[in-house]
Amino acid sequence: MARTALLHLVRSQTHQHLKSTNFHSGCNLSRLGTLLQTSRPSSGIQPTAIQRRWFSTEDDNKLSIGPQKGGESGKDEKDSGVVYYGPISNTIKKVKLLSLSTCCLSVSLGPVITFMTSPEMNVILKGAVASSVIFLSASTTAALHWFVSPYVHKLRWQPGSDSFEVEMMSWLATYIPKTIKFADIRPPETNRPFVTFKANGKFYFIDAEHCHNKALLAKLTPQKPTRDSAFKNL
């Protein structure tokens, strides 16, 4: 009898515990559903500014492959006709800016430093030293400009067009656009290094290994007339 009464008591306690647990879980689920329904905006209500800001931030933080909308796409559309980039264009610009800054410092501060130091030195000798420093700096800057002046930094060309646009570098390391016609291209006919073709009396250099458009490269590198072709023309 005692064992039967004990089992009956345990069963009744377990049944009551399960009822109370189901009741509380049902209340919690109904409360959660009510909160979700009240927090969800209706179709006729616009989201608040905080919600719009949160959603826009979430969209901006997404990773994407390729150019972004806005400035990048405009830049790509602007440079869509570019078929050649100079591989060492940035290096040439940095070296040229360094040479120009050194030349300016030599011209402006060279005479001052020379005349302020060594007071026992003759004035004529000081003038000769200052002039030598200025001449050396200016000559190296001029030689650098002469050496890299034929370098083409960027080339734009639309297939089928009879002309193309190049960007060259000036004395002050700024880019200058020029338009050249294919009919004006001639062989360089000079021993000057790093020259690909000549047009309108000026030399231009294209790195053939980085010019992937072979049709354009063939137009930019005209062959010199040989003796056999000259006899055939006669």
Image: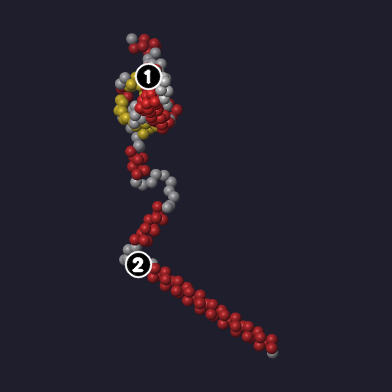
Residue, x 54% and y 80% (percent of image)? 19
Q: Position of residue 69 (x, y in %)?
A: 36, 47
Residue located 34% across and 44% down the image: 71
Q: Is residue 220 above or below residue 57?
A: above
Look at the numbered disc 2 and give the secondary structure of its residue.
loop
Q: Where 134 falls versus 16 (above or below)?
A: above
The residue labelled by disc 1 is 123
The kind of secondary structure element at disc 1 is: helix
Q: Are marks 1 and 2 in contact (CB under 8 Å)?
A: no
Q: Amino acid at mark 2?
A: Ser
Is residue 43 in sight in this rendering?
Answer: yes
Residue 230 is situated, as x and y percent measured from the top left of the image, at 36, 11
Density class for disc 1 (Cα within 10 Å; few <14, some 14-19, many ≥20) is: few
Q: Which residue is mark 2?
A: 42
Between 201 and 82, the one nearer to me in the picture = 201
Q: Residue at x 31, y 28 (%)?
A: 178
Q: Residues within 10 Å of mark 2 (few under 14, many from 20)?
A: few
Q: CA distance from mark 1 to mark 2?
A: 91 Å
On the question of residue 197 being in view, the answer is no
Amino acid marked by disc 1? Val
The correct choice, above or below, for 222 with respect to 17 in the image is above
Percent coordinates x, y for residue 56 in the rendering: 38, 56
Q: Quadrant of residue 210?
A: top left
The disc at residue 101 is none
On the rendered structure, is 97 left or right of 17?
A: left
The C terminus sits in image quarter: top left
Where is residue 179, by image quadrant? top left
Q: Earlier in the sequence, mark 1 or mark 2?
A: 2
Asked where in the image residue 13 lies, by quadrant, the reply is bottom right
Compare residues 48 and 146 and report the one nearer the observer. Answer: 146
View extreme (front): residue: 120
Q: Is residue 190 left or right of residue 26?
A: left
